[in-house]
Amino acid sequence: MRQQHFLMPTLREVPADAETASHRLLLRGGYIRQLAAGVYTYLPLGQRVLRNLERIIREEMDAIGAQELLMPAMQPAPLWEQSGRYAVYGPELIRLEDRHGREFALGPTHEEVVTALIRDEIQSYRKLPLLVYQIQTKFRDERRPRFGLLRGREFLMKDAYSFAADEEQLDAIYASMTQAYNRIFTRCGLRFRAVEADSGSIGGEGGSHEFMAIADIGEDRIVTCTDCGYAANVEQADTGLPQQEKRETPEPAAEKFATPGIHTIAELEQALGVSSKQLLKTLIYEADGRAVAVLVRGDRSVNEIRLQRILHAEQIELADADTVLRLTGCPIGFVGPAGLRMPLLVDREAAAVSSAIAGSGEAGYHLRHVQPGRDFPVEHVYDLRLAAEGDRCPRCEGTLRSSRGIEVGHVFKLGTRYSAKLGASFAGASGEQRPMIMGCYGIGVSRLVSVIAEQRHEETGLLWPMAVAPFQVHVIPVSVQDEEQMLGAEALYRRLRAQGIEALLDDRQERPGMKFKDADLIGAPIRIVFGRKASEGLVEYKERQEANSLEVTVEEAYERIV
Ligand code: ATP
Ligand code: MG
Ligand code: MG
Ligand code: MG
């Protein structure tokens, strides 16, 4: 590619609203431009990186026998009603209507579409297992789109779906998918680790793993045990709540439950489409730090929960426990049969009490109300404390370390949840009908661009690994008017291209300083500079990560590259 006519608008200024290094550098390097919040154009450089990532992913998916297809983004609402997700998905789902008034959703994920497809096409165990995937645009109206491509509202995902006749088939696919993910992220040059997404079933099946890229800006917190290798996403850790439910738990939906007031749990469950356990979880999620929920004995249908303020969560933004307390006066509470408000303990002061109770993990404890001095027996204790640095590992005697991570991939055993609801069954060897056993496996392809940039950059620009770089070699004649520099650069550029090496030739008539600054920003792994010594056949060879360049002959530079 010749730079003179290449659409690569680099910026000198640091964009004001870009909070992370990756976001700033992708804007400044001319990789992406924002059209709306969380909606981006991939400029030619960005598109080249995406294509490289897609190539790596396709190679690894094809290698484990996954078959590529492409499903529609526009998905009819009745399909989502069949799975039960239309009502509960919440405001993240982008809904629209066609000219006939039929409702559609823009796919945030494709379990429904793929399950319906396979239901109609596969009838016998002889055709199983089956593994399909696509690389496709997803839509999620994220509450907080941010950090460039990291959390978009329109983004590129690789999603794979497996259909198995029995658990063994599913386990085998899950294992090979996990290995493929390890290879993919290694080839992307990432520092990452697989963590348990659902560690509720400790020592259990391990039905869901997330691949976390290590980064301070990560929105997920992960704990790892140095002794036994246990690693988990803290959000998921030790809650006992299946990942499946978490995935479908809507955010506290003010608009869905418009009338503030005191409501019975049954009403809430119905209105929000979640169980009370999920409800607690949803609310507690919002409070950072340690939180413990206590359910007090009583008839659940009579218990009422005060949510009138909490339901404005989206307005007040439940950022931390202190805010919850300040705005509600009392933490979220249950109103017991006797009309007494029992708190759901969500504050630091209560933490001591809570952890004492939660630590026991047993019923039989009593909570004493401050004014009547009356005791309330505690029936259920959900320990929703978030695991933290220094905590005891749940698997061994080791100590937990805490770090931040960005979810780049997710592998997940779905079981028969979708196949049962959508009727995707097959005839077994003796003719009996059974629901297919499913798995789903996602990778945030566009997110990866930001994640790699976040892990691999310096102040002056990006440090792409070879396999991902938009150009592997940047050939720079310092002065395009100097015939020897220009001819030499052209010749090398052509030789490299003939070898299938992606090279960028800076044929612009710019000041050298400008050329080098742009080259740093773009971050091609190798740079060859034709300068004053070009007439002697000498060039500067520089690897992006190295501080110094080497003076070598053109031939030697070529040999080093190919
Ligand atoms: P997160 O926890 O970051 O919101 P998720 O668990 O909702 O992600 P999945 O439903 O597991 O995401 O989707 C598969 C993959 O798609 C994720 O592992 C992530 O890499 C990517 N992804 C999810 N949401 C976004 C987004 N808004 N922008 C870019 N990539 C995303
Ligand atoms: Mg999400
Ligand atoms: Mg997640
Ligand atoms: Mg996920």
Image (spheres, rainbow, N blue to C red):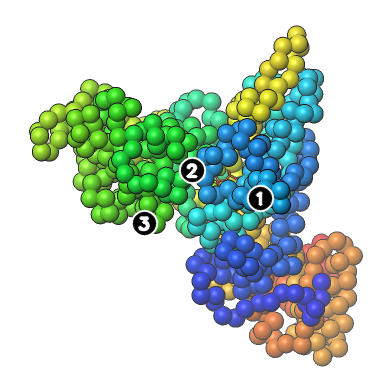
The disc at residue 250 is 2
In-front residue for pair 5/399? 5
Give yes or no for contact between labels 3 and 1 (Cβ–Cβ under 8 Å).
no
The disc at residue 97 is 1
Vertical arrangement, residue 269 with respect to residue 433, above or below? below
Q: Is residue 159 visible?
A: no
The answer to which of marks 3 and 2 sits earlier in the sequence is 2
Q: CA distance from mark 3 to mark 2?
A: 17 Å
- On the image, which quarter does residue 166 sit in? top right
The amino acid type of the residue labelled 2 equals Pro
Nearest to viewer (mark 1 / mark 2): 1
Badge 3 marks a residue whose secondary structure is: helix
In-front residue for pair 468/96? 96
| Mark 3, other Cα within 10 Å: few <14 / some 14–19 / many ≥20 | few
Q: Position of residue 281 (x, y in %)?
A: 40, 39
Nearest to viewer (mark 3 / mark 1): 1
Q: Residue at x 60, y 30 (%)?
A: 414
Badge 2 marks a residue whose secondary structure is: loop
Vertical arrangement, residue 57 with respect to residue 127, above or below? below
Badge 1 marks a residue whose secondary structure is: strand
The answer to which of marks 3 and 1 sits earlier in the sequence is 1
Q: Which residue is mark 3?
A: 316
Looking at the rendering, the quadrant in which ligand 4 lies is: top right
- On the image, which quarter does residue 276 sit in? top left
